[in-house]
Amino acid sequence: MTDKDIIRLVKDTYDVNPGVKGRSFIREHTKRKIHLSSIIMMQLKELNPLTIIITICISVMGVLLTFIKNYSSSIWVCSSIMPLAALIITADLGRSKRHQMTELEMVTRFSLRMQKSVRIFIGGMLGLIIHALIIPFLSIKSGIAPCISVLALGCPYLFTSWGCMLITRKYHNTESIYGCTAIAMSSAIIPIMVKTLLSQFNKGLLATIGAVILASLFVAITTEIRKYLQEDRNTTWNLN
Amino acid sequence: MDLNSHYTKLLRFCYMKTGNMETAEDITQETFLKFWESNTYKDVGKELPYLYAIARNLCADYYRRPHPEMSYVPLEDIADEEQDEINIDSLALKEVMKMLPDDLKEAVILRYANDYLPSEIGKIMNISRFAVNRKLKKALQLLKSGLEEGGRNDG
């Protein structure tokens, strides 16, 4: 008997496969793999249609404003409507928290962290689309430098998003939406104030301050997203 | 971790250790449940050695426990046993395998039944791949002499 014969014999002798019990165990414990794009598509379907409609309306309104000839205030009007977009998007992201449905979402196929991350990604993409649509038109039609447009549109948008996320994280009830609305309204007033200040102060100085504020808001919103994702890490089932 | 493939390989390992399909299946499932429940596993990338260590301990526990009554054996397993009886060579191999030291038996099953590489077996058994190759060589020699001796006795 050669080594090859012995190896073949070992293979044949111990070539056992799972029985009925084993197969059902494997079936029961095998996690079905799902692609990230499928999760994004699923979460997109869960998005309130009103959010999409309002986002499209704001984008279209912003683009149309740039078509008005000799209208120098178009950037400030666009800037004032951005908080509304941020309010609508963040309100949709935090709806499970507001309606105290976090526990229910914990039992779904995906982890709550994954769902929240995907929703934030969708929200971020919607915000990016609005900015990406309006800023080029402001540059082409109204002749405003893209960096100024980024500052004018980005600051109120990020401030509202940050404020709404903070309120949603701190207050888990339906009334928190009023706080979010107040923040959005306050942010909408800021561009009007800036427009007034523009005539009194140096434009370069205001642009520098705006850039610092935008950078600070980026840091603030990143920190807020991190806290928002970590918040439910220790959430346990209420079994009482 | 591909559960289907690892389950089958671990089942073969437990079957070699216990010699009983039903017990092997139970121990395999218990191994996976313990592996998933365990909070002590920290070394990422060493799942396989950890999994086999649990299986090894559970098989040892099985032998320590008294077995007063016969357990229920499903029909398909009886059929397997009958099929084994027909295969004289397999029976002879099982008898010779029983006489091998535990480490040699493990090396043989992991290499030839589960198709693990010597480096992977080394990690599972916590020895170098050269030691694995030495054990495999020795095991094959012992199996060969055992089977030939068995053949002469039968003849």
Image (tube, coloured by chain):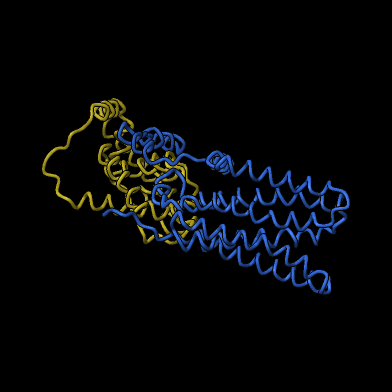
- Colour of chain A in the rendered structure image: blue
Eyeballing the image, is A182 above or below A68? Answer: below
* Spot occupied by residue A144 in the image (x, y as percentages of width and height): 85, 57
The answer to whether one can see residue B135 in this image is no
Residue A22 place in picture, x, y as percent: 33, 36
Which of A29/B94 is in front?
A29
**Residue situated in front as seen by the camera: A181 or A169:** A181
Q: Nearer the viewer, residue B72 or A101?
A: A101
Q: Is residue A115 above or below residue A215?
A: above
Quarter where residue A223 is shown: bottom right
The x and y percentages for residue A207 are 79, 69
Q: Is residue A168 left or right of residue A77?
A: left
| Left or right: A213 in relation to B41 | right
Up-down relation of residue B12 to residue B78 (above or below): below
**Residue drawn 41% across the image and 36% down it:** A11
Which one of the lettered chains is coloured yellow?
B
In this rendering, position of residue A120 left or right of residue A208: left
Q: Quadrant of residue B67?
A: top left
- Pick the residue in front: A85 or B108: A85
Residue located at (73% from left, 67% from top): A193
